[in-house]
Amino acid sequence: MDTQIATNAQIIDGKAFAAKIRSKVAEHVSRIKAESGITPGLAVVLVGEDPASQVYVRSKGKQTVEVGMASFEHKLDANTSEKDLLALVDKLNKDPSVHGILVQLPLPDHLNSDLVINSIDPAKDVDGFHISNVGLLATGQKAMVPCTPLGCLLLLRDLHGSLSGKNAVVIGRSNIVGKPMAQLLLGDSCTVTIAHSRTKDLPEVVRRAEIVVAAVGRPEMVKGDWIAPGATVIDVGINRIERDGKQVLVGDVDFDGAAAQAGAITPVPGGVGPMTIACLLANTVTACCRANGLAEPEGLTI
Ligand SMILES: NC(=O)C1=CN([C@@H]2O[C@H](COP(=O)(O)OP(=O)(O)OC[C@H]3O[C@@H](n4cnc5c(N)ncnc54)[C@H](OP(=O)(O)O)[C@@H]3O)[C@@H](O)[C@H]2O)C=CC1
Ligand SMILES: Nc1nc(=O)c2c([nH]1)NC[C@@H]1CN(c3ccc(C(=O)N[C@@H](CCC(=O)O)C(=O)O)cc3)C=[N+]21
């Protein structure tokens, strides 16, 4: 029997917030088309058959078209050579109808993902993973900002207004989520702690946080009694597990336990995930404007 736990926390509706961002993106896309005749275009490169990646690529392609942008999908065989992949990236770099390029990660083991990511034109790097964009973000300069951390920051700003002086704990230090998330929170003047697999007494570290961002990849690892009363919990985790004989999606946070403590919490699904895709579309419009000397949309990036 499941015990029903009283939930006091505000459930942060990432799905609704993402829909608002996409409608703003759609308005900018129509404006750009009318003013310049240019259609913003996003190219996504998927190597291999990872089922989770396929789901993401499919919904991304659908939403790209829905906001009026051009979507280019390149599905390559799992054993594609590095040379062929680099040649495709080079072609997309040179293609004026492509304003954003995303190479889905992880890549198969025989491909050097750092090399591939750094071969993308930084101006088209809508994931914000190129070393130039990483350096620009770290030094507080105008960059392409990684979509998932950007989505989390937009949710947090919407909820709190100013984040200045808040104690934030980011669990996870990956290049795609944890590190850029910490940079963004630091940029908004949070006091930031980055926790990882070698962190001592993680529950105690998390208890000090007014903002917790969990990006670990371990289903429901963060427990309710780690959460300070009233804290904001942003759950980045996307884990497919089997529960009662069914496949379900859960985050890195024990939702029911954390919701009983938190002031606000993102659900999985319907939290950070939809924001990631919305921010990818927003970054593509921003990249298109920068490439063509057009007025850059306000409020779609930091
Ligand atoms: N919602 C979205 O849009 C997105 C969701 N995701 C999801 O977010 C999660 C994280 O993704 P990603 O950053 O790529 O994952 P990675 O596997 O690259 O990084 C995981 C991080 O978690 C840390 N970690 C692992 N185990 C523990 C532990 N027991 N205690 C503390 N820290 C731990 C690791 O530490 P160490 O460095 O020491 O090994 C590492 O820094 C995944 O579930 C992924 O599916 C990812 C991208 C987008
Ligand atoms: N170069 C690159 N950039 C990425 O941004 C990137 C990547 N590689 N590799 C994989 C991860 C994962 N990721 C997700 C995005 C949206 C959802 C999403 O929309 N999730 C829905 C549920 C989807 C479902 O039901 O499966 C939700 O949370 O509500 C999930 C995961 C982006 N990633």
Image: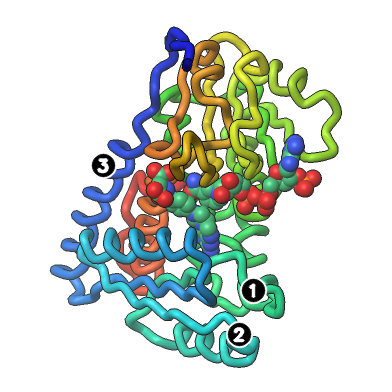
Of pointers 2 and 1, the one earlier in the residue sequence: 2
Residue 212: x, y in percent? 60, 27
Q: Residue at x 60, y 37 (%)?
A: 219
Residue 107: x, y in percent? 61, 71
Dot in front, 3 or 2 = 2
Alpha-carbon distance for marks 2 and 1? Answer: 8 Å
Of pointers 1 and 3, the one earlier in the residue sequence: 3
Q: Residue at x 37, y 78 (%)?
A: 98
Regarding mark 3 in the picture, which secondary structure is present there?
Answer: helix
Q: Residue at x 61, y 21 (%)?
A: 166
Which label sits on residue 108?
A: 1
Regarding mark 1 in the picture, which secondary structure is present there?
Answer: loop
Question: What kind of residue is marked 3?
Answer: Lys
Which residue corresponds to mark 3? 20
Asked if residue 60 is positioned above or below residue 267 in the image, the reply reads: below
Asked if residue 274 is positioned above or below residue 2 in the image, the reply reads: below
Contact check, label 2 and label 1, Cβ < 8 Å:
yes
Viewer can see residue 139: no
Of pointers 3 and 2, the one earlier in the residue sequence: 3
Question: What kind of residue is marked 2?
Answer: Asn
Alpha-carbon distance for marks 1 and 3? Answer: 35 Å
Q: Residue at x 36, y 55 (%)?
A: 282
Which residue corresponds to mark 2? 79
Asked whether 141 or 54 is in front, the reply is 54
Question: What kind of residue is marked 1?
Answer: Pro
Residue 138: x, y in percent? 67, 51
Alpha-carbon distance for marks 3 and 2? Answer: 39 Å
Contact check, label 3 and label 2, Cβ < 8 Å:
no
Q: How many marks?
A: 3
